Amino acid sequence: MSRFAPMVDEAIEAIEGAASLADLEELRPTLLGKKSALAGASRSLGAMDPDERKAVGRELNVAREAVEACLARRLDSLRVDDRRQQLEAERMDLTEVRPDLRRGHLHLVTQARDRLEDVFVGMGYTVAEGPEVETAWYNFEALNIPEWHPARGTFDTIFVNLGEPEEVMLRSHTSPVQIRTMEVTEPPIYVVAPGRTFRTDAADATHLPAFSQIEGLVIDRGITMGDLAGTIDEFVKAFFGGEIESRLRPSYFPFTEPSAEFDISLPDGGWLELGGCGMVNPNVLQNCGIDPDVWQGFAFGFGIDRLAVMRYELDDIRELVNNDVRFLRQF
Ligand code: PHE
């Protein structure tokens, strides 16, 4: 047995007894520093004769290594403890409910759009999308509104100055998504396309220059106006509940023939105009490479913001974009 064994045992006991990293740091010089017992023993080697010095020196090295190894292990384990304690102290419970904080929620228009999507998805439709900046082809031409057509003027379009005049614009309705869908989809087609639309309208109680529409498009065999009327009725009932009725009034759109406007009944006995609809004009089908002798369809488009106004009984459509949290919080 090494003559240094008691020294080593004592050192190890002290190391294991250290309760924290700081205690251990404090201990280190007394174990391995100049004033330590090991250093003292090392100094006494000088007085020994060479053979003895060699033997004792070797024992001393073994002893020192044992103490160093023990110190390193203890350091490691105290560091792990330390880190664990720190993590525990800084832990955050992200599921914690703070009754003193008000949770946000989706904007009214988003809620209305989501509900509309749900209603149509429930009827077997899928949801389509298109860009907010469009070319004249998608916003007008393919929809059977050539350049000379007076209907172009009725859309109060906001143009974007990117080269040719009146060639690029903020879409004035979601109907361009009809074209984009038909271009890439084989019939039968059942889609709705909600999205933002833009017109030069000044904001007032019933108009916004940036508003939202939802477009519907059905292309299948043997589709009639009756399917259109039934679909609108179904969706109005699903969205508002049983009491609200819908009606169609003859109208005109270049991309549908025949065309209609549809209204929903108001609690006060009046009617609110919600949007336009009709049977897809054969010219539009042809523009998209769909044979009108085989396929027929209907389309509709209406304002989501107006629907939100009606559903939440708002006095002024501008409330939707004022971003006054006191208003928004109510819903
Ligand atoms: N795009 C028309 C509008 O914004 C509405 C519409 C859509 C009419 C589809 C007929 C068919 O006024």
Image: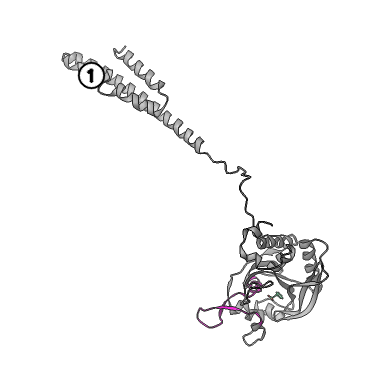
Q: Which residues are magenta?
A: 154-182
Q: Nearer the viewer, residue 97 or 322?
A: 322
Residue 230 location, quadrant: bottom right
Q: Quadrant of ligand 1?
A: bottom right
Does the stretch in magenta take in 76?
no
In this rendering, position of residue 222 left or right of residue 207 = right
Which percent across, then down, holds residue 111? Answer: 68, 59
- Residue at the bottom extreme? 148
Which residue occupies 77% across, 65% down? 235
Which percent across, then down, holds residue 307? Answer: 72, 66
Which residue occupies 32% across, 15% down? 7
Number of disc labels: 1
Q: Is residue 20 above or below residue 103?
A: above
Does the stretch in magenta take in 162?
yes
Instruction: Name the residue beneath numbered marker 1.
Output: 42
Disc 1 under 8 Å from ligand 1? The reply is no
Evaluate whether residue 145 shows in this view: no
Residue 331 location, quadrant: bottom right
Q: Residues within 10 Å of mark 1 (few under 14, many from 20)?
A: some
In this rendering, position of residue 250 left or right of residue 286 = right
Evaluate whether residue 37 shows in this view: yes
* Colour setting: one colour
Q: Is residue 304 above or below residue 172?
A: above
Q: Nearer the viewer, residue 119 or 308?
A: 308
* Residue type at tag 1: Ser
Which residue occupies 33% across, 17% down? 8
Which percent across, then down, holds residue 184? Answer: 63, 70
Which residue occupies 77% across, 77% down? 260
Which percent across, then down, holds residue 168? Answer: 55, 78
Q: Quadrant of the N terminus?
A: top left
Q: Element type at marker 1? A: helix
